[in-house]
Amino acid sequence: MPSDDDLSDGDRCYATALRILKYRWNGRAELRRKLARKSFEAEAIDGTLERLTREGWVDDERFAASFVRDRARKRIGRRRIVAELRSTGIGDEEARRAVEENVDKETEERELLALCRKKMRILAGRKGDEFAASAEGRNKLLVYLLSHGYDLAASREAVGLCIEEAASGDE
């Protein structure tokens, strides 16, 4: 069995890339950055990325779709998902397309309401049941939802609906 010292730079780069991919999918640009941080030469990185693409290990479209589904399950809104995808090296158009194709509107609305209800329970525990209906409480709820990447109009609607539910005891 050859030691790491017996392998070429390209083979070591390839093996390192596979170890990185073992933990989670990576986009092409993200994997390039990780390999560069490990001090591999650009030529070895380029060869490795080409080989991994041919073998099906690197596919930005598949990576983006998986990333979007994972983040949406964690109650992260479209705007934040697009921003996070862009930070991995996926282009703006590709990121927006991945979100459109992989986030169901109805599911997103349900998750937004669930997140709002959860935050309302937390606020009620800290500040009392009536706090969420106050101007300060509404603002805290709204900022919380916006920080999770949800749209302003949808967040306002969710806050209003959750406060109505709480007032009528329908939750």
Image: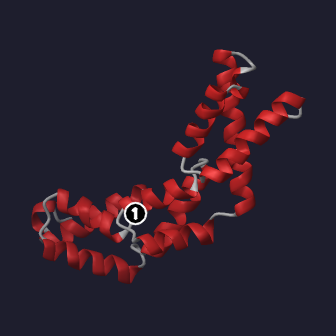
Residue 52 image offset from top left, x and y in percent: 34, 76
Q: Which residue, as the protein is rendered here, is positioned at the far front?
A: 135
Q: Is residue 108 left or right of residue 23?
A: right
- Could you tell me which residue is drawn at 29 percent across and 81 percent down? 50
Q: Quarter of the image holding residue 53?
A: bottom left
Q: Quarter of the image holding residue 90?
A: bottom left
Residue 104 image offset from top left, x and y in percent: 69, 64
Q: Which residue, as the protein is rendered here, is positioned at the far bottom?
A: 54
- Could you tell me which residue is drawn at 46 percent across and 74 percent down? 94
Q: Is residue 3 left or right of residue 131?
A: left
**From the viewer's perspective, is residue 89 above or below residue 79?**
below
Which coloring applies here? secondary structure
| SS of the residue under disc 1 | helix
Name the one closer to the observer, 107 or 165.
165
Q: Quarter of the image holding residue 43?
A: bottom left
- Could you tell me which residue is drawn at 30 percent across and 80 percent down? 51
What is the number of callouts on the image? Answer: 1
**From the viewer's perspective, is residue 126 above or below residue 5?**
above
Residue 141 image offset from top left, x and y in percent: 63, 35
Name the one closer to the observer, 10 or 46.
46
- Tell me the residue that label 1 is attached to: 86
Image quadrant holding the N terminus, namely bottom left
Name the one closer to the observer, 12 or 136.
136
For mark 1, does the 10 Å Cα neighbourhood hold few (<14), some (14 to 19), or many (20 or more) residues?
A: some
Q: Amino acid at mark 1?
A: Arg
Residue 82 image offset from top left, x and y in percent: 48, 61
Q: Is residue 19 left or right of residue 126?
A: left
Image quadrant holding the C terminus, namely top right
